[in-house]
Amino acid sequence: MSKEKIAVAYSGGLDTSVMIKWLKDKYDAEIVAVTGNLGQQMEIDNLESKSIATGASSFHFVDLRKQFVEEYIWRALKAGALYEDVYPLATALGRPLLAKALVDVALEEGCTMLTHGCTGKGNDQVRFEVTFASLAPHLKVIAPLRIWEFTSREQEIAYALEHNIPVSATKKNPYSIDENIWGISIECGVLEDPMVAPPEDAFQITTSPEKAPDTPTVVDIEFVEGVPVALDGRQMAGLDLIVKLNELGARNGVGRLDMVENRVVGIKSREIYEAPAATILHFAHRELERLVLEKSVFQYKKNISQDYANIIYNGTWFSPMRHALDAFVNVTQKPVTGLVRVKLYKGGISLLGRNSPYSLYNEELATYTEADTYDHKAAEGFIKIYGLGLKTFHEVNKNS
């Protein structure tokens, strides 16, 4: 009987570090560790040597940053996808791409099984496994955190110490952190009590608003068809633009989010997020849309934005519905070209100005000065026709 060969989505964090050793012993299997680079800064040093020392037979480090920005982040930004109007979906957006990268390596290496380090009560298990089912339904899937003997992070830490597995989590630093270029999610520890304010040590990149500079930062952001292309007049590749906005936003305390959200599996969870660039770009993009989109399109797109956010959050990225919504979104983004000027100051974002060659704002119609060209007399007839249905209803139904 041939030996199992397991492709592991490896982050270098506590769960996946323990998982390699556990899987190797449990299944007497050959382990292929796969890490996708989505722009994370934490726990990326010495991943290959760490994974091999822990028991992996090979390691793959796949640079997904450009693809992540151009094929995932920009699509979500153009759609205005904010889960439950708050969360810019950093972790959720990265999961289908990481799952796809794992599948690609698994097929290349001839693996028989796929493994992730997601918990049995979280969203990520759904995102990974739905993607696996979409792209490689013939491969078996193992979710160790749903079946192994450890019932707490403290037990995992003890196991890691016993087997000399290097991990950054300790009993004094119990946070579970996931990071990519679009944002950071922080949970566990004292954060599990929604009445406890997030301690400063929970935040990884942002300055406390109280300690942010007393001088605001003003940024001009240019968009072409819904995609940001320049900062302060300087054309930039998407990856570099996000990195720069993360730096500016973090310095000014922008992008801290504290949210109780509805998970896919039916429970509410308290999540802390840091997403400076995402927060700034969603704000600026929305304000540009207000300027250029026709009223019915602008208002209807709010529904699409929530639908799109749900697709990302719920793990159905590789679905015909997402492809169909992309078609709608791309049409709406044709006129979303122009400049938005924002001010970053002590945790807040303020709008200072916006312009576009496709602006639907007409000052001669909007003004109350002598330059006014609006036909005021036409309003009387419009109101009579507009209110005729309600007028008739209430004449017939006098007691309603």
Image: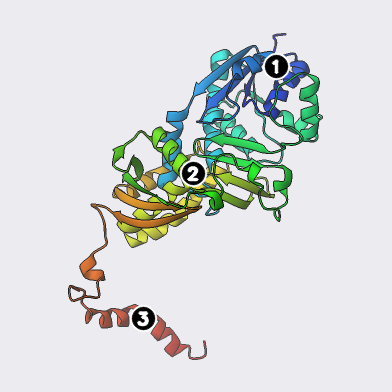
User: Which badge, 2 or 1, comes first in the chain's sequence?
Assistant: 1
Pointer 2 with pointer 1, Cβ within 8 A = no
Q: Nearer the viewer, residue 170 or 19?
A: 170
Residue 197, can we see it?
yes
Numbered label attached to residue 387? 3
Q: Position of residue 300 (x, y in %)?
A: 41, 58
Q: Are marks 3 and 1 in contact (CB under 8 Å)?
A: no
| Number of residues whose C-alpha sits closer than 10 Å to that of mark 3, classed few (under 14), some (14–19) or many (20 or more) | few
Residue at x 20% of width, y 74% of height: 372
**Which sits in the foreground, 375 or 182?**
182
> Foreground mark, 2 or 1?
2
* Residue, disc 2: 251
Asked whether residue 293 is in view, the answer is no
- Identity, as a three-letter code, of the amino acid under mark 2: Arg
Residue 282 vertical position relative to residue 106 in the rendered view, above or below? below
Helix or strand or loop: what does disc 1 sit on?
helix
- Quadrant in which the N terminus is drawn: top right
Q: Which residue is mark 1?
A: 54
User: Where 67 sits versus 90, above or below?
Assistant: above
Q: Amino acid at mark 1?
A: Thr
Q: Residue at x 72, y 37 (%)?
A: 174
Q: Nearer the viewer, mark 2 or mark 3?
A: 2
Q: Is residue 293 left or right of residue 166?
A: left
Judge depth for marks 3 and 1 and give the one in front.
1
- Element under disc 2: helix
User: Which residue lies at the image location 47% right of the left edge and 45% below the top edge?
Assistant: 249
**Image-based side of 360 in relation to 125, left or right:** left
Q: How is the image coloured?
A: rainbow
Circle 1: is it few (<14), some (14-19), or many (20+) Cα within 10 Å? many
Q: Left or right: where does residue 95 sit relative to residue 54?
A: left
Q: Residue at x 27, y 62 (%)?
A: 361
Q: Earlier in the sequence, mark 3 or mark 1?
A: 1
